[in-house]
């Protein structure tokens, strides 16, 4: 018997619900090419709509991005843009959700995430600046109990995306 797939999104051969809305990733001032490549690869894993690297400079070596992103380099819609261009890239009905530890952030495992979401991750050292955080409808953090209280930006994004996917799909 031949099966008809009604959804254009597959996850390991399993049809995603017709209500699945691909997330968007906004990476703010990421400077390490390996992190850029890892984020692109992660976007491919989770079936993201697009990845926007917000920066005033895109002088990151493309060869290192390609090496880390592997086959995802050409299969994901990604680009560098300025902060001024960002507003034209995210649909009005999407919620900006920052992944950052702040005094008013929610534990991601207790937060109710929306289906139409653009996850915002920040610079490897400085994180997401306050001006950008003010634009977000929600700020979530990942609880960490060890001596090192931070995660690599792509690891934090992975946890957030897969928690979002768990809430949307499973």
Image (spheres, rainbow, N blue to C red):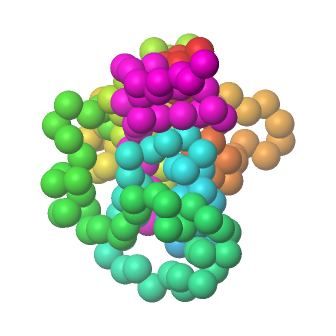
Residue 154 pos. (x, y %): 62, 52
At 50% from the left and 42% from the top, the residue drawn is 47
Position of residue 170 relative to residue 47, above or below, is: above
Q: Nearer the viewer, residue 131 or 37?
A: 37
Up-down: is 107 above or below 127?
above
Image quarter (top left, top right, bottom left or bottom right) of the C terminus: top right
Which residue does the image show at 47% across and 35% down from the upper left?
Answer: 9
Please tell me in which quadrant of the rendered image residue 38 appears: bottom right
Q: Which stretch appears magenta?
A: 1-29
Q: Nearer the viewer, residue 135 or 48?
A: 48
On the question of residue 139 being in view, the answer is no
Taking depth in this image into account, of 119 and 65 the one nearest to the observer is: 65
Q: Does residue 153 sit above or below 47 in this rendering?
A: below
From the viewer's perspective, is 45 left or right of 5?
right
**Where residue 95 appears, x then y in whole percent?**
30, 32
Q: Position of residue 137 (x, y in %)?
A: 30, 30
Q: Residue at x 26, y 41 (%)?
A: 135
Q: Chief secondary structure of the magenta span? A: loop
> In the rendered structure, does residue 13 fall within the stretch colored magenta?
yes
Q: Is residue 25 visible to us here? A: yes
Verify whether residue 27 appears in magenta. Answer: yes
Quarter of the view holding residue 84: bottom left
Residue drawn at point x = 37 percent, y = 20 percent: 19
- Relative image position of residue 114 (x, y in whole percent): 38, 22
């Amino acid at each position: 018997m031949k099966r008809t797939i009604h959804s254009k999104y597959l996850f390991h051969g399993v049809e995603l619900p017709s209500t699945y809305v691909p997330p968007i990733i906004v990476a703010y001032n990421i400077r390490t090419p390996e992190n850029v490549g890892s984020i692109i690869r992660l976007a491919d894993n989770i079936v993201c709509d697009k990845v926007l690297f917000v920066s005033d400079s895109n002088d990151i070596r493309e060869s290192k991005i390609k090496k880390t992103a592997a086959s995802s380099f050409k299969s994901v819609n990604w680009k560098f843009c300025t902060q001024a261009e960002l507003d034209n890239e995210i649909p009005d009905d999407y919620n900006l959700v920052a992944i950052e530890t702040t005094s008013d952030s929610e534990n991601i495992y207790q937060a109710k995430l929306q289906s139409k979401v653009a996850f915002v991750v920040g610079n490897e050292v400085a994180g997401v600046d306050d001006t950008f955080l003010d634009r977000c409808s929600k700020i979530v953090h990942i609880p960490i109990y060890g001596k090192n209280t931070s995660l690599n930006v792509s690891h934090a994004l992975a946890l957030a995306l897969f928690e979002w996917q768990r809430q949307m799909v499973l």
